Image: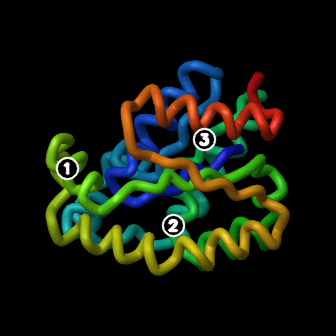
Amino acid sequence: MIILFGAAGSGKSIQGQRLADKHNFRWLSVGQLLRNQNDPELDKIMRKGELVPDEFVVKMMHAAGEEALAASQNAILDGYPRDDWQADWIIENGDAKKIDGAIILKVSHEELWNRLQERAREDDTKESIEKRWDLFEHTISSMTKKLSEAGVRIQEVNGEGAIEEVNERIEKVLADWGIIQ
């Protein structure tokens, strides 16, 4: 499994979907899986910019990852883990051993704002975006440190530029790691 880290608007979902389509990986996006639950309570939480409880997220993502592995598919984890508690859960429950590496998409705040204004998703309110950015910025260092100490490779990738350029940068890292050819 491959983790794609990045702030809201970094392009991790676009890149995750492209990698999944091209390499027959399963794209496991926390946001998309939560939206697919069709649960009014979850929708209400997300519209407020609040976070769905960690316990629900880790169980949902663990099950989705196990399903992908059972189907002999690699998976792209998009938006997971999102905090230290989830990173600890991954490590303590053995899921870190199933992770081939983590890629952090680095994008400036100015570019993130521009991208989010273009996508105009219902749960992308100014308040919810700022909450997600703050969470990401406050947790990325500690999460990646924990995962790295658990043996997960971590690589930053420039997430700015054309979609194809960013995709090539990510694929170069995955090829260097021996995940794709």
* Mark closest to the chain's N terminus, 2 or 1: 2
The circle on residue 114 is 1
Mark 3 neighbour class, 10 Å CA radius: few under 14, some 14 to 19, many 20 or more: many
Q: Which residue is mark 3?
A: 76
117 is higher (above) or lower (below) than 108: above
The answer to whether 11 appears left or right of 181 in the picture is left
Q: Amino acid at mark 3?
A: Ile
21 is higher (above) or lower (below) than 41: above
91 is higher (above) or lower (below) than 157: below
> Where is residue 71 shown, x and y percent of the image?
74, 28
Q: Determine contact: label 3, label 1, CB under 8 Å.
A: no
Q: Determine contact: label 3, label 2, CB under 8 Å.
A: no
Q: Which residue is mark 2?
A: 82
Point 80% across, 40% down: residue: 177
Q: What whole-number distance in Å separates the C-alpha atoms at marks 3 and 1?
A: 25 Å
* Mark closest to the chain's N terminus, 3 or 1: 3
- Callout in the foreground (3, 1): 1
In the depicted view, which residue is nearer to us: 156 or 29? 156
Q: Amino acid at mark 2?
A: Arg
Pick the quarter of the image with the N terminus. Answer: top right
> Where is residue 141 shown, x and y percent of the image?
58, 75
> Where is residue 132 shown, x and y percent of the image?
34, 68
Q: Is residue 68 visible?
A: no
Q: Amino acid at mark 1?
A: Asn
- Callout in the foreground (2, 1): 1
In the depicted view, which residue is nearer to us: 131 or 122? 131
Q: Quadrant of residue 7?
A: bottom left
The answer to whether 156 appears left or right of 12 in the picture is right
Q: Secondary structure at mark 1?
A: helix
